[in-house]
Image (spheres, rainbow, N blue to C red):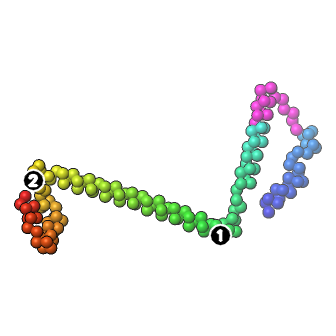
Amino acid sequence: MAGLLAWAADVVGKNGKDGGDEKDRIPLVFTEEQQKYVDELGRKAATLSRSIQDLRLRLPPSDISQRLPHLHAHSLASNAALTLQLDSHSATREQAQVREQTLLEGRSRFSSSKVEGEFIRYKDYPWLVTILNLLDIICGCRSLKMLRKV
């Protein structure tokens, strides 16, 4: 309704460009510099007005989500899927970094526990004791017992 009233006011009032107001206007006298500045401002205002009009034409209608609900739902689903994918990649990267750090720590412990000419101390690695016991039971390998002498 407000838009209709504004349009009617423009049509009836001719946007204030009626020649009848000439006698009510005060004549302005500008210097040459001031006139150039006013002209430059007028050009900038016209350019800005055209840019604003172009941008208004590019804007979708406000009720587009109601008119095209499947597109709106698809857009929301796509955004959610992309967010989940990004989160999963971040988690995978963090897990890989933690695993790499664990392996580096294990490698450094292994290399520090080795002494030249000796075997590793199996007591530092309880999982190794379990494996050796299982091998003794399964294979009956007596040669593995030499590892336990260290």
Residue 47 is situated, as x and y percent measured from the top left of the image, at 75, 42
Residue 60 is situated, as x and y percent measured from the top left of the image, at 70, 59
* Left or right: 134 as drawn, with respect to 16: left
Height in image: 115 above or below 30? below
According to the picture, the residue beneath numbered tag 2 turns out to be 118
Closer to the eye: label 2 or 1: 2
Residue 132 within the magenta-colored segment of the rendering: no
In the structure shown, which secondary structural element does the residue marked by tag 2 occupy? Answer: loop
Q: Which residues are magenta?
A: 25-41
Please rate how many residues cluster around mark 1, counting C-alpha atoms within 10 Å: few if below 14, some from 14 to 19, many from 20: few
What's the mark number on residue 69? 1
Q: Residue at x 89, y 50 (%)?
A: 14
Residue 15 visible to an observer of this rendering: yes
The C terminus lies in quadrant:
bottom left
| Quarter assignment of residue 73 | bottom right
Give yes or no for contact between labels 2 and 1 (Cβ–Cβ under 8 Å).
no
Kind of residue indicated by mark 1: Pro
